[in-house]
Image (cartoon, helix red, strand yellow):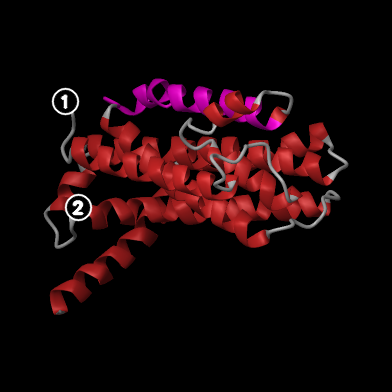
């Protein structure tokens, strides 16, 4: 029991250390802040005047903003920690492997969700109506944060160095951005919108849309509500990313 408590205590002490390291490195801090800045910029440019318009903005900007801030930063941080030897040094402590990854990813998750909720407050200040389902909105953003950290960890396993991260993050960023645009834009047939929901992370756009406007673009599937389908898909992709990262994880520099 003492060993478990000691490990848990070390995990809780690791997260603040990682948070301070994020604040000290300007490039990762800029990456973390660029997402919410983009989300506010979208609102200022689009200037929606209906609940559906704000829902569309919340869905698209929420997903892309979290990918830019949390996903790209987590991929960068995990790659940097590995290549600097920090992960291998932590591996010699009482922390377990999952504890090290959780300690490094927790500040990114907390910062990402907090930023997204703060941006939602800015939307309200700009004239957006209150979300129809605030609980679903918070759940969608929190799950998106977990997905982004897990996906960042997986991406780090195929990134040879920090400079290479900008190339390894591109496929998911581009695919998710295009699919989310097609999903929330309206006018696409149900089959195409359903296919867009299969792209990793994209269900967040539909969930945030529904949370704000009360309805969303994704169709029901065989009588199963689109909300439930979106949650299952998002949890599934998060599990795939987590298991994939665990299977390919390296503690030492790739050399």
State which region is magenta.
159-184
Q: Nearer the viewer, mark 1 or mark 2?
A: 2
In the image, is residue 148 above or below residue 187?
A: below
Toward the viewer: 145 or 106?
A: 145
From the top left corner, tell me how far across and down residue 148 is, in percent.
44, 42
Which residue is at 43% across, 24% downward?
A: 166
In the image, is residue 4 above or below residue 222?
A: below
In the image, is residue 194 above or below residue 100?
A: above
Toward the viewer: 87 or 228?
A: 228
Q: Is residue 60 left or right of residue 29?
A: right
Residue 179 lies in the magenta stretch: yes
Numbered disc 2: secondary structure: helix
Toward the viewer: 144 or 194?
A: 194
Q: Is residue 202 left or right of residue 97?
A: right
Q: Which residue is mark 2?
A: 97
In the image, is residue 129 above or below residue 67?
A: below
Q: Report whether residue 24 is seen.
A: no
Q: Is residue 160 left or right of residue 4?
A: right
Q: Which residue is mark 1?
A: 255
From the top left corner, tell me how far across and down residue 174 is, in percent.
52, 22
From the top left corner, tell me how far across and down residue 136 is, in percent.
61, 57
C-alpha separation, residue under disc 1 versus residue under disc 2: 21 Å
Q: Quadrant of the N terminus?
A: bottom left
From the top left corner, tell me how far across and down residue 195 is, in percent.
53, 27
């Amino acid at each position: 029991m003492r060993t478990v408590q000691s490990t848990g205590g070390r995990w809780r002490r690791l997260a603040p250390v990682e948070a301070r390291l994020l604040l000290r490195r300007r490039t990762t801090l800029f990456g973390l802040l660029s997402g919410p800045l983009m989300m506010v910029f979208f609102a200022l440019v689009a200037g929606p005047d209906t609940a559906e318009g704000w829902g569309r903005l919340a869905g698209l900007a929420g997903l892309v903003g979290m990918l830019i801030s949390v996903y790209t930063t987590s991929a960068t941080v995990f790659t940097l920690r590995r290549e600097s030897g920090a992960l291998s040094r932590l591996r010699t402590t009482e922390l377990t492997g999952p504890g090290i990854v959780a300690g490094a990813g927790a500040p990114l998750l907390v910062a990402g969700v907090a930023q997204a909720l703060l941006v939602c407050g800015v939307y309200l200040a700009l004239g957006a109506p209150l979300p129809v389902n605030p609980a679903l909105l918070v759940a969608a953003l929190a799950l998106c944060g977990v997905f982004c950290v897990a996906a960042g960890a997986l991406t780090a396993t195929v990134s040879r160095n920090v400079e290479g991260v900008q190339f390894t993050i591109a496929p998911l960023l581009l695919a998710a951005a295009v699919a989310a645009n097609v999903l929330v834009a309206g006018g696409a047939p149900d089959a195409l919108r359903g296919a867009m929901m299969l792209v990793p992370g994209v269900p967040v756009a539909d969930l945030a849309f529904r949370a704000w406007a009360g309805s969303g673009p994704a169709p029901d599937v065989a009588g199963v509500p689109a909300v439930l389908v979106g949650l299952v898909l998002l949890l599934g992709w998060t599990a795939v990313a987590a298991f994939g990262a665990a299977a390919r994880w390296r503690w030492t520099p790739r050399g």
